[in-house]
């Protein structure tokens, strides 16, 4: 009986050892022969893929200027000019409201995320520079519009928000789609719009067209628009940020190919283009406010360039 018992144990242990070493039984998953095989991961849907792609693009855009430096344009001064209302409110600790007024480049067409439009980037930069200030930037861009449509909606889109500063970007759509007479008509419209803003004591910064293939393909219109906007800024005594000349330097002086700062349509900027534009604009706004706060007299229309 003892031998039989020992034999039984030996048989049992051998059986167990065989079961463990045999491939079809030697894993926890195979312990139950009738268990269902593990399921393959479900294929990702289009929505999931789109979300993951957007997150990846946003991560890349977040540090985009550390990979492609954003250098100040040659001849760009430290300040835009006087921004007395904004400076006064920041110095007093009062809330500051800024309206970004313009077309599709204000909306941010071409960016990978709404967080990387130029108004969003600029808001982040100004809040870092003035951490105790309550700064709000309202994006009032609307694609496809230019001076006639903008002036028509000036009350509802801008004045009703009671802003302290209006950054007015315009001119590109008229250059691309309009005639020489349309470009010339811009002058009176913009002068009228600025006069209405100034009557309310609002600071104004003008932004001229971007330097992109769709604009440079119309050199006569582009040259005329850039000159007219510089003249309007001079006549109305407001600062002008010369986006056209800044972007021209990216391409011609810094030898940056268009596809490094413009998307495939040849008209709108990409994440890097918007980020660099916002950074340079923010730098000169911060410097302008700083000088006013320090009691340094700055002419209100320090012109940055006379490019064409």
Image (spheres, rainbow, N blue to C red):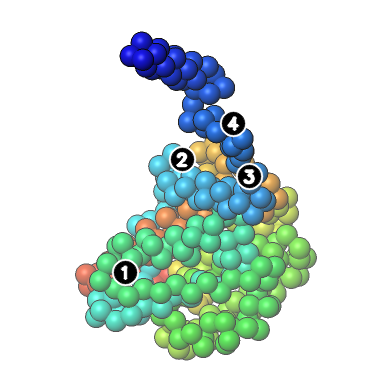
Q: Would you identify the image quadrant in which residue 121 lies?
A: bottom left
Residue furthest toward the left? 294
Q: Is label 4 or label 1 in front?
A: 4
Mark number displayed over residue 33? 4
**Image quadrant occupied by the C terminus:** bottom right
Mark number displayed over residue 289? 1
Spatial CA span between label 4 and label 1:
76 Å
Horizontally, residue 285 falls left or right of residue 294, namely right
Instruction: For residue 23, say whether it is visible.
Output: yes
Residue 187 x, y percent position in the rendering: 63, 74
Q: Is label 3 or label 2 in front?
A: 3
Q: Which mark sits nearer the N-terminus, 4 or 1?
A: 4
Residue 63 x, y percent position in the rendering: 42, 46
Q: Which mark sits nearer the N-terminus, 3 or 4?
A: 4
Spatial CA span between label 1 and label 3:
55 Å
Q: Is label 1 or label 3 in front?
A: 3
Tag 2–tag 4 contact (CB < 8 Å): no
Secondary structure of the residue carrying tag 1 is: helix
Task: From the viewer's side, name the closer residue of 53 and 14.
Answer: 14
Residue 264 x, y percent position in the rendering: 68, 46
Q: Which mark sits nearer the N-terminus, 1 or 3?
A: 3
Q: Would you identify the image quadrant in which residue 129 lies?
A: bottom left
Tag 4–tag 1 contact (CB < 8 Å): no
Q: Is label 2 or label 4 in front?
A: 4
- Residue behind mark 2: 68
| Identity of the residue drawn at 57% across and 22% down | 24
**Image quadrant occupied by the N terminus:** top left
Task: From the viewer's side, name the closer residue of 55 and 172.
Answer: 55
């Amino acid at each position: 009986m003892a031998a039989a018992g020992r034999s039984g144990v030996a048989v049992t242990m051998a059986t167990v050892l065989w079961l463990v070493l045999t491939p079809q039984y030697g894993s926890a998953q195979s312990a139950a022969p009738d268990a269902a095989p593990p399921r393959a991961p479900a294929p990702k849907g289009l929505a999931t893929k789109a979300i993951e792609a957007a997150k990846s693009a946003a991560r890349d855009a977040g540090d985009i200027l550390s990979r492609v430096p954003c250098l100040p344009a040659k001849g760009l001064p430290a300040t835009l000019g006087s921004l007395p209302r904004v400076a006064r409110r920041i110095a007093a600790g009062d809330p500051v409201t800024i309206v970004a007024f313009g077309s599709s480049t204000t909306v941010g067409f071409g960016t990978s995320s709404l967080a990387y439009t130029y108004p969003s980037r600029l808001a982040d930069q100004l809040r870092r520079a003035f951490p105790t200030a309550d700064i709000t930037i309202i994006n009032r861009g609307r694609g496809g519009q230019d001076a006639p449509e903008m002036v028509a909606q000036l009350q509802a889109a801008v004045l009703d928000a009671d802003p302290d500063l209006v950054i007015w970007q315009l001119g590109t759509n008229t250059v691309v789609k309009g005639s020489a007479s349309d470009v010339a008509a811009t002058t009176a419209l913009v002068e009228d719009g600025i006069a209405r803003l100034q009557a309310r004591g609002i600071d104004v910064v003008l932004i001229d067209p971007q330097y992109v293939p769709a604009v440079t393909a119309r050199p006569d219109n582009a040259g005329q628009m850039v000159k007219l906007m510089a003249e309007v800024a001079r006549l109305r005594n407001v600062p002008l940020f010369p986006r056209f000349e800044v972007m021209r330097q990216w391409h011609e002086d810094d030898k940056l190919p268009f596809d490094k700062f413009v998307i495939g349509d040849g008209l709108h900027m990409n994440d890097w283009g918007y980020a660099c534009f916002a950074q340079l604009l923010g730098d000169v706004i911060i410097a302008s406010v700083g000088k006013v706060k320090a009691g340094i007299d700055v002419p209100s229309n320090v012109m940055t360039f006379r490019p064409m």
